[in-house]
Structure formats: structure tokens, C-alpha cells
């Protein structure tokens, strides 16, 4: 794996290539990338050189912005153990 390219993922049904770069794992999506090109990219001896030669500037791309707080909106689940207020009185 390249020192600049940290990870890659491909969705063949959409011909969509995601590439994570650098120590901060910036992610970009590249659209319309044929599967054979992804396969060659993943097997390349130098993925950085392959990327610069065959992908960079040749396909539409967009940065994927990560939310500032990825867990925002999630709520913690209260304990399911009964308390004196939830136990029916007999």
C-alpha cells in the first residue's frame, strides 16, 4: 500500500471507487471507474504512481465530508433492569 493511499474500496454496481489518503484519511469518491481499472490499481506495485497516471484527473470525483460528530443523533439506551417505579404494586 502506498504511503499516501491508505485504503480503497470499489462498488462495481456503481463503478464507484473510494480512496482514503494520508494520515488523516481524507476520502474521495471517483465515479465511472471500470472494474478492470480498479483491479489493476489494487494490484499495482506502486499504487501512488498508478493513481496519478490512470485515475487522477481522468474521472469525476468528490470529497466525502465526514460529520464533525459521527455519533450525533444517537441516544444511549437506558438500562432494562426494573426499578421500584416500574415494578407493579400488588
Image (spheres, helix red, strand yellow):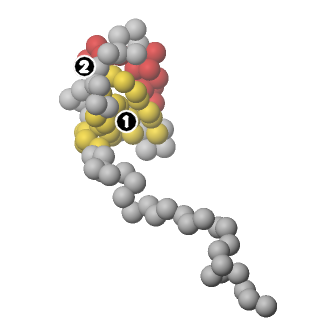
Counting labels gives 2
User: Dot 1 corresponds to which residue?
Assistant: 18
Is residue 86 placed above or below 68 in the rendered structure? below
Quote the CA–CA distance across marks 2 and 1: 15 Å
As drawn, the residue found furthest toward the left would be 57
As drawn, the residue found furthest toward the top would be 45
What is the number of the mark on residue 69?
none
| Residue 30 horizontal side relative to residue 87, left or right | left
Helix, strand or loop status at disc 1: strand
The residue positioned 35% from the left and 10% from the top of the image is 46
The answer to whether any part of residue 55 appears in the image is no
The answer to whether any part of residue 16 appears in the image is yes
Q: Pick whichever of labels 2 and 1 is earlier in the sequence.
A: 1
User: Dot 2 corresponds to which residue?
Assistant: 52
In this view, the residue in front, 20 or 71, is 71
Helix, strand or loop status at disc 2: helix
Is residue 35 placed above or below 52 in the rendered structure? below
The residue positioned 35% from the left and 15% from the top of the image is 2
For disc 1, the neighbor class at 10 Å (few under 14, some 14 to 19, many from 20) is some
Amino acid at each position: 500500500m502506498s504511503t499516501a493511499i491508505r485504503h480503497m474500496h470499489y462498488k462495481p454496481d456503481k463503478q464507484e471507487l473510494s480512496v482514503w489518503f494520508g494520515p488523516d484519511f481524507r476520502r474521495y469518491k471517483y465515479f465511472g471507474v471500470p472494474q478492470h481499472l480498479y483491479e489493476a490499481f489494487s494490484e499495482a506495485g506502486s499504487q501512488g504512481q498508478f493513481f496519478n497516471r490512470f485515475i487522477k484527473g481522468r474521472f469525476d470525483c468528490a470529497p466525502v465530508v465526514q460529520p464533525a460528530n459521527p455519533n450525533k443523533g444517537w441516544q444511549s439506551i437506558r438500562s432494562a433492569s426494573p426499578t421500584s417505579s416500574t415494578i407493579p404494586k400488588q
